[in-house]
Amino acid sequence: MDIKYFSEQLNKNSLTIACLVDGLSNEEAKWRSEPKKWSILEVVNHLHDEELNDFPLRLKYMLYYPEKTWPSIDPVSWVMENNYNERDISESIKNFLSERENSIKWLDEIVDPDWEIEYNASWGKIKAGDMFAAWICHDLLHIKQIINTKRLFYESKFDKYSSEYAGKW
């Protein structure tokens, strides 16, 4: 696996996320399409906490401390417990970008990682390479979520008009 290439993809993903949230009003950042769906602000804060407590941390455990048990996480509960939707979008994106920058610096320092090393998680075995791949694709999942939430927000504001001509979602 080309760590430099995928590290650059993580960087590009973070810049894409920053562009997607740039200039959002508080209303747009905090808006939810449904009560149980996440707002864009909640997605950004989720990404920040994942950067701190999930993908890079667990990958470090796999590569450097394979015998140790991962710290437990509960990303879904964090959304409400940590009041993600009460935070400031500008500060939240800065926090995410800062942690992502730290992660990329760390990735740039890794020499010849063993991507085949396995961790026996509660759901089954996972390789370090799987964790790295999931980290990159996790960003894409949330980029898609941000885009869809923006679309639904705009549609809620179109009043009696339809965006149907744009194409099928």
Image: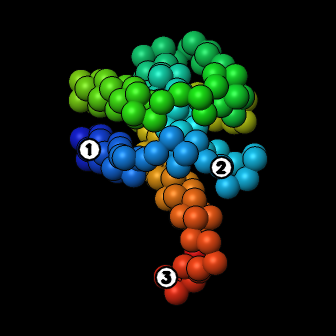
Picture coordinates of residue 91 (x, y %)? 41, 28
Is the C-beta separation of discs 3 and 2 under 8 Å? no
Picture coordinates of residue 165 (x, y %)? 52, 87
Determine which of the numbered discs, if any, sits on residue 166 in the image: 3
Picture coordinates of residue 134 (x, y %)? 50, 44
Left or right, 129 with respect to 39, comes to left
Q: Identity of the amino acid at label 2?
A: Arg
Quadrant in which the N terminus is drawn? top left
Residue under numbered circle 1: 8
Q: Identity of the amino acid at label 1?
A: Glu
**Foreground residue among 61 and 84:** 84
Q: What's the CA distance linking mark 1 and mark 3?
A: 32 Å
Which element type, helix, strand or loop, lies under badge 3?
Answer: helix
Q: Mark 2, residues whose alpha carbon is within 10 Å: few (<14), some, or many (≥20)?
A: many
Residue at the extreme bottom of the image, as rendered:
165
Which element type, helix, strand or loop, lies under badge 2?
Answer: loop
Is the C-beta separation of discs 1 and 2 under 8 Å? no
**Foreground residue among 1 and 107:** 107
Q: Earlier in the sequence, mark 1 or mark 2?
A: 1
Residue at 65 percent of width and 31 percent of height: 79
Residue under numbered circle 2: 32
Q: Mark 3, residues whose alpha carbon is within 10 Å: few (<14), some, or many (≥20)?
A: few
Q: Earlier in the sequence, mark 3 or mark 2?
A: 2
**Residue 69 falls in image quadrant:** top right
